[in-house]
Amino acid sequence: GLLRLLDLLCRFRDMVTPTVGVLRLCLLLLWSFGGFPRADPPPGLPHVAVAFRSAIDLVLRVFGALSQGQGGPGQPELHTEFQNFQTVAIVLQFLAWVPSETGRTSTDPWRRAMAASMQLLSTLVLHHHSLAHEFVQNEGLQMMVQHRLLSVDLARYDSSVTKEDGGAGM
């Protein structure tokens, strides 16, 4: 059910108005991957890496739109939403789980999910000091070094995907 909801949100993302409530829904979908089965989904459902990447893309899209209008009095502190849904920990957990032998081809869904995950983490760490602290507490840098997530190949891949990816749905 969550994968179907995620797919619908991705397909109609241009019609979704970015609000804090929508951000919470997207973060909840991303958070649900913390307990997601690590096996391939049943036929007709997307690969777990594709679904995870789609959830991250939605979060980045909504967060970007909300961040543009942030700063006035009465505006919510968006970093608390990421803390409430343990976003940094969930993304790091997912990255640690990615099979190490993947990512060798440009069409590999794991590589795309890794690139999106790195983009979200870097955005969050730059956004607020408490999210950066959470990244350090969860030993994010050590995990990235161990899993070779700071490689030049991944950065090159991330920039090439960003240029070619206009994407619809999952």
Image: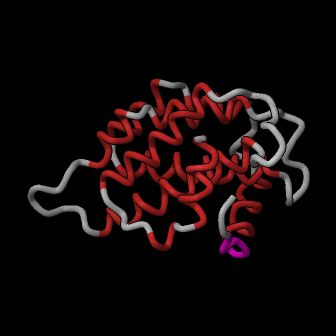
- Location of the C terminus by quadrant is bottom right
State left or right for residue 109 relative to residue 67.
Answer: right
User: Which quadrant of the figure has residue 37?
Assistant: top right
Residue at (58%, 61%) from the top-left corner?
Answer: 10
In front of the other: 23 or 121: 23
In the figure, 124 relative to 167: above or below? above
Magenta stretch, main secondary structure, is loop
In front of the other: 5 or 163: 5
In front of the other: 7 or 98: 7
On the image, the x and y values in percent for residue 149 come to 71, 42
Residue at (84%, 34%) from the top-left corner?
Answer: 100
User: Which quadrant of the figure has residue 47?
Assistant: top right
Residue at (45%, 39%) from the top-left corner?
Answer: 28
> Does the magenta-highlighted stretch encompass residue 37?
no
In the figure, 165 relative to 20: above or below? below
Q: What's the colour scheme?
A: secondary structure
- Location of the N terminus by quadrant is top right
Residue at (70%, 61%) from the top-left corner?
Answer: 158
Q: Which residues are magenta?
A: 163-167
In the figure, 30 relative to 105: above or below? above
On the image, the x and y values in percent for residue 144 come to 66, 35
